[in-house]
Amino acid sequence: MMFKKTRFYQYFLLMRLHRPIGIYLLLHPTLWALWLASKGQPSLDLIIVFVLGVILMRSAGCVINDFADRKVDPHVRRTKDRPIASGLVSSKEALYLFIFLILLAFLLVLQLNFFTILLSIPAVCLAIIYPFMKRYTHFPQIILGAAFSWAIPMVFSAYLNEVPLLGWWLFLTALLWTVAYDTQYAMTDREDDLKIGVKSTAIFFGKFDKLIIGILQILVLISLSLIGFDQKLSFLYQLGVLGMAGFFIYQQYLIKDRDPARCFEAFLNNHWAGLVVFMGLALSYL
């Protein structure tokens, strides 16, 4: 109870550590890359570096996102009580916290090779520009997809000192998955976003939103399945992909009426979709 009364609790909320779904969605593709790049034998030190990096970068992304949306969030039902929107954390404090988190993440990257350090620069740039894109384009989800998937080329670089075709193939697959689930997320705020002039794929796709999400999900499944065949992974991996397909079908059921609460439930369900693929991948290397 005492912690909830401290300043650090507001920072905890600002980083959304109480809602780890973003960490999970960022972590799953990173783990896919760790197992594929190492042929199922990832080193403990790199696992620690990338898992901590995921937590720090997702936290930093939440902070800079709320800073960018500080004049928008008070007008959206779902976000009006966030620390900056409610005035409990100042914009200056948020910027200092963002810089602190980025510096911690950079200290982690310094443990890796020079090429991976160079690749960390676009990661920071993507984290910074994403929150502002919703004012200029209907496709901020693509920028988010690149940001959430950028750990993949960094993982391959850390292991191989290069990013092979497999790394970029997996990167594109994860990007498509991110666009699909973040469109579900955007569907929950569509009415508010239309009122305040914020853009998203959910608004751009309009009445074709469910269809396009379905197409993106099919492309993700095909791509992941082909990666399995290319890497000669066992049937256990393909069972994981099949499990993801089952979760995608369930998500289509959830969003069928475009009810905001059900669309948000579909978004959250992607944690299990990503986890089951990782489980199949890890088991296939045993």
Image: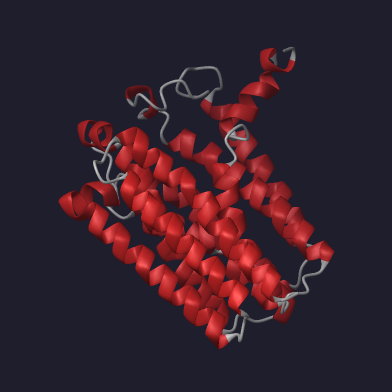
Camera sees residue 120: no
Query: Quick one: 234 or 2, which is closer to the camera?
Result: 234
Compare residues 25 and 64 and report the one nearer the observer: 25
Q: Residue at x 43, y 37 (%)?
A: 68
Residue 154 % position (x, y): 64, 69
Look at the image and tell me in which quarter the C terminus lies. Answer: bottom right
Q: Is residue 212 left or right of residue 184?
A: left
Which residue reaches farthest left?
207
Counting from the top left corner in percent of width and height, residue 102 is at 65, 48
Question: Can you say whether 151 is above or below 92 in the image?
Answer: below
User: Which color mode does the image show?
Assistant: secondary structure
- Considering every residue shown, the one lying at the far right of the view is 44
Q: x, y (%) of residue 3?
A: 73, 17
Task: State whether residue 12 appears in this view.
Answer: yes
Q: Nearer the viewer, residue 96 or 143?
A: 143
| Looking at the image, residue 150 lies above or below residue 204 | below
Relative to 8, residue 171 above or below: below
* Residue under the point 33% across and 52% down: 252
Q: Which of the 4 image quadrants contains residue 17?
A: top right
